[in-house]
Amino acid sequence: VGKPIGIALIGCGVVGTGVLRLLAEHRESIEARIGSSLEIRGIVVSDPSRERDPLVPSALLTTDGEALVRSHDVDLVVEVMGGVARAGALVRLALETGKHVVTANKALLAEEGVALSALAEQKGLDLYYEAAVAGGIPIIRVLREGLSSDRVRAVYGIVNGTSNYILSRMRSAGLEFAVALAEAQSAGYAEADPTLDVGGGDAAHKLTVLARLAFGQHVRTEHVAIEGIDRVSRVDMQFAERFGYEIKPLAIAQRLTDGRLDLRVHPALVQQDAALAGIHGALNAVYVHGELVGPSLLSGLGAGAGPTAVSVVADVVDVAQNLVAGAPARRAAGVRDANAKVSVQPIGELVSSYYVRMTVRDRPGVLARVTGSLASHAVSVEQMVQQRPETASSEVAATLVFLTHEAREQDLRAAITEIDASQDVVSPTNVIRIVDQA
Ligand code: HSE
């Protein structure tokens, strides 16, 4: 067994504690794989006096991240703190001072990943981030290694465990949104700021990272059209079910035939017999569609201490093996030209079918006017139901739900703007995209 590999752990929340637990419980088999031992030199926290799991060695806690990262007996910095400013400063310092880095920080990677990868490459260091996307699913390795010889056409799926958990629990247990979110928080799935989960930002960060690896282009989170799951209500789920669909939180990145990228995060109706419809709770699932390999689906737990720690420590093993072999920085970052313009299809140009739920006054002529507006914007109706709400708040309200044929999004939105501005509609119309290839 060679010289011990010194690790600085930055952050000791749900994931950091999971990493320490995994290292303690699997130490023997991990060190056998590496051919060397791993030693935690220090753990950076903001408040050392906070009550923690007894397995966290309190003597190693420090608030002085800079000193720990700089110290000579640290070879590898493991960042599981989250947030961009402080975590980013420590990761940069690590690379500048010759330390390899493992990070689970998708927000940081989405914002600065290309520059950090370039810095790591320039310094001959490893920067690994398997846990940043889809928790325990090894999707980064699949894109970096397993499918690196193919050309990826699309990568898409469910990459936010909290959103999937919430929608699953709303559907299966009839829970209110807020109750399901509280459950996801207590299970350790949710971000410190859960609006990142339910607003789609977390999934957009992950999609940014995946799209860079898949397409070799400097995709930025601003390129992603984002909608959260907060627009989905129980009534939408019930209507979706009537039409044979489920509502799932999807993230989609695809290369179109004209070379532009289609990048979006949104809840979507998927057919009940589609593979992604069967992915429940905190499970994630990611399809990679390669030109030669075809579709490949990976699924597993996308959040939580255990699955995330597995991915973090798998990276630690990889970096340690590289160190032992004296061969770090074997893999290029994936983005070919950081300054090349990324050509993205504006969301208005998307061609999709849609679920549209309107609350209208129930009186003669309304349906004719609504379908007239849709028709005048080239939106064709595929199916429709009208229902009086069981507990109608207004004597005259009725719910109209349409599934449309494929239409251009900007045409549909123009029709809805026109319809919502009319006296026929009593509250804003809800539109959810339908994704058929899921
Ligand atoms: N909050 C994230 C999720 C954790 O729910 O998927 C994993 O990145």
Image: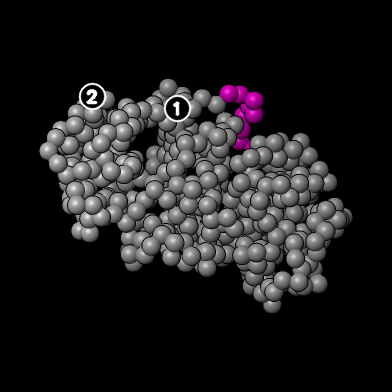
Magenta highlight on residue 336: yes
Q: Which mark is residue 345?
A: 1
Q: Amino acid at mark 2?
A: Ser
Residue 137 position in % (x across, y down)? 51, 54
Marks counted in the figure total 2
Query: In the rendered image, which residue does mark 2 sit on?
Result: 376
Residue 274 in view in this figure: no
What's the residue at 14%, 35% (across, down)? 365
- Disc 1 versus disc 2: nearer the observer: 2
Residue 145 position in % (x across, y down)? 56, 43
Residue 83 in view in this figure: yes
Classify the position of the C terminus by image quarter: top left
Query: Badge 1: how crowded within 10 Å, few (<14), some, or many (20+)?
Result: some
Q: Is residue 415 above or below residue 172?
A: above
What's the residue at 79%, 68% (across, down)? 60
The residue closer to the viewer here, 432 or 98, is: 432
**Is residue 190 found left or right of 235 in the rendered image?**
right
Q: Main secondary structure of the magenta part?
A: loop
Magenta residues?
Answer: 332-341
Q: Earlier in the sequence, mark 1 or mark 2?
A: 1
Which type of secondary structure does the marked residue at label 1 adopt?
loop
Q: Is residue 154 above or below residue 24?
A: above
The residue closer to the viewer here, 111 or 126, is: 111
Quadrant in the rendering for residue 62 = bottom right
